[in-house]
Amino acid sequence: MQKKLRVGIIGTGNIGTDLLMKVIKSNFLECTMFIGRNLQSKGMSKALTLNVPLSDKGIDAVIENHDKFDLIFDSTTALSHLEHAPVFEKYNIIAIDMTPAKIGEFIVPAVNIEDIKSKKNINMITCGGQSSIPIAYSISQVVNDIEYIEIVSTISSKSAGPGTRANVDEYIETTEKALSLFTGCKNIKAIINLNPAIPSIDMQTTIYVKSKNHDIKKVKNAVNEMITKIKRYVPGYSLITEPKYINGIIMLTIKVQGAGDYLPKYAGNLDIINCAAIEVAEKIAKEFTTKGIN
């Protein structure tokens, strides 16, 4: 039987708690501690019912129990991760950063999961990044004169908790930086809209790519191939508006519906970044087993 990778989760909000549920479902991961600041929080209360080891000591819990972790998901804030990262590095713990702190290696599983090898700090970019970068990247592989890329992600305001709202500036900066890195385009704009509609909407991301030359058939093929890759780890990812070329701009829209592990299905923005993080962690777990690192 494969030995599971020992993972901790620091940050017990929506993202952290949903990650916990996904870790419990995994055949390759086990949660050795769920770490926050308030034992009365909804996330901690949920973990308590699952008999998961808890701590309300924050990063001090990592320091005191560093030998219990191979990997830690940091689902706090960008500012907090900057403080946590040296601790993870000191104790040789792999960090999967769920915040837009952008100090680790940018990873989008459908594009560059192999780049995780030997990396100790892995950044999952943003929810908008995970939804848009694979598609923008696939278009950049068949369109060589991209002048401008704009992505507009719309999420339910109910799925944007305090952590999401606190990170908005970093969200935009990190998403734009990663889009530029993966596509080679220097002129990038990322927008996020919080929609208060009731009933709550699923996450949608519209991608605009300005280009003088294109082959829309090649673009459609590239996009569909990428969607197939993404759906392997994000089943709720789908194309709702096929690529069109209008007035020099390639346009398309995707939708992400969550798995409903902990959060409502409309919270696809949280689900996609968590699914991507779990895909990375399980890849690391398999590498550990193969190399006998455990």
Image (cartoon, grey):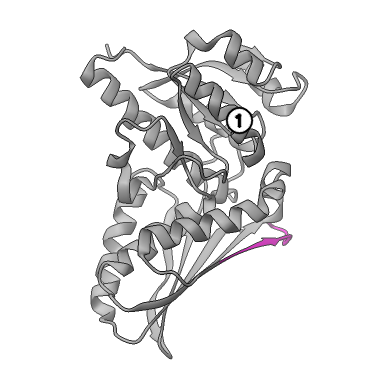
Q: Residue at x 34, y 57 (%)?
A: 227
**What residue do we see at 52% from left, 36% from top?**
97
Q: Position of residue 113 (x, y in %)?
A: 32, 42
Q: Is residue 79 above or below residue 250?
A: above
Residue 210 visible in the current orientation: yes
Q: State whether residue 202 appears in this view.
A: no
Q: Quadrant of the C terminus?
A: top left
Q: Which residue is mark 1?
A: 17
Q: Position of residue 204 (x, y in %)?
A: 54, 62
Which contiguous range is marked in magenta?
Answer: 190-200
Q: Nearer the viewer, residue 177 or 56?
A: 177
Residue situated in front as seen by the camera: 113 or 255: 113
Q: Residue 82: give x, y in percent of width and height.
A: 60, 35
Q: Residue at x 60, y 37 (%)?
A: 15
Q: Residues within 10 Å of mark 1 (few under 14, many from 20)?
A: many
User: Along the line of sight, which residue is nearer the eye, 32 or 89?
Assistant: 89
Q: Residue at x 31, y 68 (%)?
A: 140
